[in-house]
């Protein structure tokens, strides 16, 4: 059941991506010949207007086929009025960007929903104060709840950590101390120091700290009204940045190729999250993961690989700058190379997926 839900979710993400291409193509006057969810043999199809809609046998992707665009044979050209190639490079770029943009926009909506519904988060409760560090010197104690930084309220330990890392000069922390009738608000000023640490990619870095550790308290954190929109924007930016950094680290060799995952990993992770989320009633856990995967799809499709949206955008930018389209043969062989790279990455992801399952 969980695998079925995972495939439905993945198909929905692909549908939303292709819907972006479809809508902007139609706005630009390009005929969409096929809109398919899945690849391979068409199991179910129907025609509405000039477009054939289909559900295909392999539910691990999808595509829209625009008139005049054929990735399988880039040498086939069509310049009729409703053809993709008859449009200006900027219109083509808009059509290509629409898919990734729809994925990112969907992720933003999902993050807003998570903020409104509530997310289980690590609360800003101090568990340990290290001796001779800025926090101890400022009078911060174990059990203190940090409720505001420089007059701005915070709700999670992550917000506290970000504020310290990004701090410029002293921070004014508002603490909630004590329980019941003895509860009081205390204001302290603390200046962070730099210390060696490791980032999520296990690289040695220097980061700012104040010398506190979390008490491990967790709770449901809600964001209402405008705060939910700000939360959605912040999380979308953080997820996009993390995925872009991961790609760069993978190319540079910091992240090993064994970390590359394929569709099997995506389906299994979504399936596990959907099962746990439905069992515990924590639907926000599933929404959070779906938002992250939607960002992943959006960013990956912008890679400058000719078989992906990013590669086609690169060709059109070349045409804008050079005032002429790339050589037919160059575009053809670059597209073949792009498909080879993409196929290689898919096979690597599948190999790693199978290895993880057997390990």
Image (cartoon, rainbow, N blue to C red):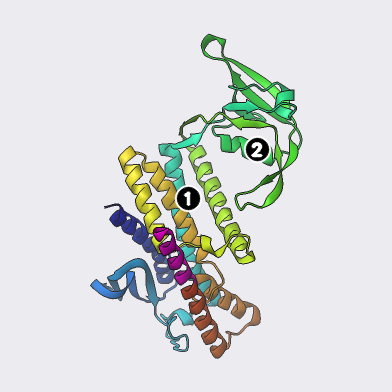
Q: Is residue 182 above or below residue 102?
A: above
Nearest the camera: 213 or 101?
213
- Badge 2 is on which residue? 163
Q: Where, by quadrant of the figure, is residue 213 drawn?
A: top right
Circle 2 crowding by C-alpha within 10 Å: few under 14, some 14–19, many from 20: some
C-alpha gap between disc 2 and disc 1: 22 Å
Nearest the camera: 41 or 260?
260
* Residue 306 in sight here: yes
Q: Secondary structure at mark 2?
A: helix
**Residue 175 in the image, given as x and y percentages of width and height:** 62, 22
**Residue depicted at 53% across the width and 86% down the height:** 333
The span shown in magenta is 345-359
348 within the magenta span: yes
Tag 2–tag 1 contact (CB < 8 Å): no
Number of disc labels: 2
- Picture quarter with the C terminus: bottom left
Q: Main secondary structure of the magenta part?
A: helix
Q: Which dot, 2 or 1, sits closer to the camera? A: 2
- Badge 1 is on which residue? 108
**Residue depicted at 54% across the width and 32% down the height:** 155
């Amino acid at each position: 059941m969980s695998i079925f839900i995972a495939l439905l979710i993945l198909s929905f993400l692909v549908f939303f991506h292709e819907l972006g291409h479809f809508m902007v193509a139609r706005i630009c006057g390009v005929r969409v010949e096929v809109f398919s969810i899945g690849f391979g043999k068409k199991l179910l199809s129907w025609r509405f207007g000039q477009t054939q809609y289909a559900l295909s046998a392999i539910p691990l992707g999808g595509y829209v086929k625009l008139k005049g665009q054929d990735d399988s044979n880039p040498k086939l050209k069509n310049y009729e009025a409703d053809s993709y190639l008859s449009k200006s490079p900027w219109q083509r770029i808009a059509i290509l960007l629409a898919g990734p943009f729809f994925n990112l926009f969907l992720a933003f909506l999902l993050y807003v929903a998570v903020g409104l519904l509530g997310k289980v988060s690590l609360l800003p409760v101090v568990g340990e104060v290290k001796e001779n560090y800025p926090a101890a010197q400022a009078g911060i104690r174990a059990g203190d709840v940090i409720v505001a930084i420089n007059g701005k309220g915070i709700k999670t330990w992550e917000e506290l950590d970000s504020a310290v890392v990004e701090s410029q000069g002293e921070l004014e922390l508002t603490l909630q101390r004590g329980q019941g009738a003895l509860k009081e608000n205390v204001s302290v000023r603390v200046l962070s120091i730099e210390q060696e640490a490791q980032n999520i990619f296990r690289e040695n870095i220097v980061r700012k700290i104040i010398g506190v550790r979390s008490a491990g308290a967790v709770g449901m954190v809600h964001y209402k009204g405008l705060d939910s929109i700000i939360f959605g924007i912040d999380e979308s930016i953080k997820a996009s940045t993390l995925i872009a950094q991961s790609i760069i680290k993978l190319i540079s060799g910091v992240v090993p190729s064994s970390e590359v995952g394929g569709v099997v990993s995506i389906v299994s992770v979504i399936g596990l999250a959907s099962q746990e989320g439905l069992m515990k009633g924590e639907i926000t856990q599933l929404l959070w993961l779906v938002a992250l995967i939607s960002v992943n799809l959006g960013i990956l499709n912008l890679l400058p690989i000719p078989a992906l949206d990013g590669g086609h955008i690169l060709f059109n930018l070349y045409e804008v700058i050079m005032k002429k389209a790339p050589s037919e043969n160059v575009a053809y062989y670059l597209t073949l190379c792009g498909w080879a790279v993409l196929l290689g990455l898919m096979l690597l992801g599948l190999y790693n997926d199978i290895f993880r399952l057997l390990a």
